[in-house]
Image (cartoon, rainbow, N blue to C red):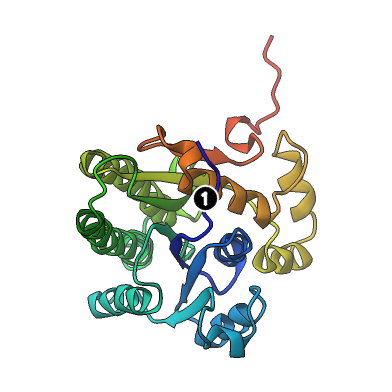
């Protein structure tokens, strides 16, 4: 099976920064047509300008990138995103749900537990966009007479907080766990139609946000590294390469799995007590 995604069309959400941007840039470098989607229009325009095509090129004939800025909690925005993708590239082969929102919560405060806001931000857009894109993938395969092989792939970006409990992160942890179950449920539903759905859960990544946090919180870098058996923090490119694997034919028999890329962090009990 091939790792190639050259010539395929991908939608990547959360593509204005962090891991989403790394994935979108990586896909462009691999020869894919990529629609960068994000709510932050200014950051998105900057991202497009550094993704391998200039702003001028991105508007020209044969360009490999497009930008779409909208809040994907809206059904209309999801429909418009898909329409824009089809208008630009006439098809969609890969969807990467990389948009994430992380907000701290107060578990015992009904007004601040953040469960519903985190589900609305991290689960529902992935579900609705996956449903719309999967229908398009199935329809285009029928029109093309493709009766064998995978016709499309969906990758949901999750977090090790789906399985590990972190203080003050109940809402996000619940949403991450729900997203993992969504991945498995959609995989079962779509496998007969030859659309593969998988997930990728990760931990700390060297992003701008983490960089700011490490500068503001003394000892944070050392604490993260100490909690990671690999002894370092991941580069966003490493997450992008793992997503590339799941999106390509190289993972053609991988269905409904949530791959963990965390340097072993989720395996470690950080309470260092030696029992006799």
| Residue at left offset 64%, top offset 52% | 204
Whether residue 207 can be seen here: yes
> How many numbered callouts?
1
Q: Please provide percent x and percent y for residue 16.
A: 56, 74
SS for dot 1: loop
Is 239 displayed left or right of 254 in the figure? right
| Residue at left offset 62%, top offset 83% | 46
Nearer-the-camera pick, 237 or 216: 237
Is 230 displayed left or right of 46 in the figure? right
In this rendering, the answer to whether 93 lies above or below 197 is below
Is 265 displayed left or right of 211 in the figure? left
| Residue at left offset 32%, top offset 68% | 111
Whether residue 166 can be seen here: no
Q: How crowded is mark 1: few (under 14 residues within 10 Å), some or many (20 or more)?
A: few
Nearer-the-camera pick, 78 or 203: 78
| Residue at left offset 70%, top offset 58% | 206
Q: Please provide percent x and percent y for residue 226.
A: 76, 40
Q: Farthest residue toward the front?
A: 145
Is 88 displayed left or right of 53 in the figure? left
Name the residue beneath numbered marker 1: 167
Q: Please provide percent x and percent y for residue 25.
A: 61, 66
In this rendering, the answer to whether 9 lies above or below 176 is below
Nearer-the-camera pick, 37 or 158: 37
In this rendering, the answer to whether 133 lies above or below 251 is below
Q: Farthest residue toward the top?
A: 276
Nearer-the-camera pick, 213 or 48: 48
Q: Quadrant of the C terminus?
A: top right
Using the rendered view, name the quadrant where residue 123 is placed.
bottom left
């Amino acid at each position: 099976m091939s790792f190639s995604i050259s010539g395929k069309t991908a939608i990547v959400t959360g593509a204005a920064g962090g891991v989403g941007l790394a994935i979108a840039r990586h896909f462009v470098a691999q020869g894919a047509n990529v629609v960068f989607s994000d709510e932050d229009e200014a950051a998105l325009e900057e991202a497009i300008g550094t993704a391998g095509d200039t702003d001028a090129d991105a508007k020209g004939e044969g360009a490999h990138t497009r930008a779409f800025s909208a809040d994907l909690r809206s059904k209309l925005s999801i429909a418009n995103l898909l329409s824009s993708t089809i208008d630009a590239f006439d098809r969609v082969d890969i969807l990467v749900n990389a948009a994430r929102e992380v907000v701290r919560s107060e578990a015992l405060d009904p007004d601040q537990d953040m469960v519903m806001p985190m589900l609305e931000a991290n689960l529902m857009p992935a579900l609705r966009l996956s449903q719309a894109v999967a229908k398009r993938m199935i329809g285009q395969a029928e029109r093309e007479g493709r009766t064998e092989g995978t016709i499309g792939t969906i990758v949901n970006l999750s977090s090790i907080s789906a399985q590990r409990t972190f203080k003050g992160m109940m809402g996000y942890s619940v949403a991450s766990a729900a997203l993992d179950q969504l991945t498995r449920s959609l995989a079962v539903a779509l496998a007969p139609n030859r659309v593969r759905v998988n997930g990728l859960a990760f931990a700390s990544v060297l992003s701008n946000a983490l960089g700011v946090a490490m500068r503001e919180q003394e000892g944070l870098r050392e604490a993260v590294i100490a909690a990671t058996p690999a002894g370092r923090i991941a580069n966003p490119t490493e997450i992008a390469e793992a997503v590339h694997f799941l999106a390509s034919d190289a993972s053609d028999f991988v269905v409904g799995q949530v791959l963990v890329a965390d340097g072993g962090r989720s395996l470690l009990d950080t309470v260092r007590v030696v029992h006799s």
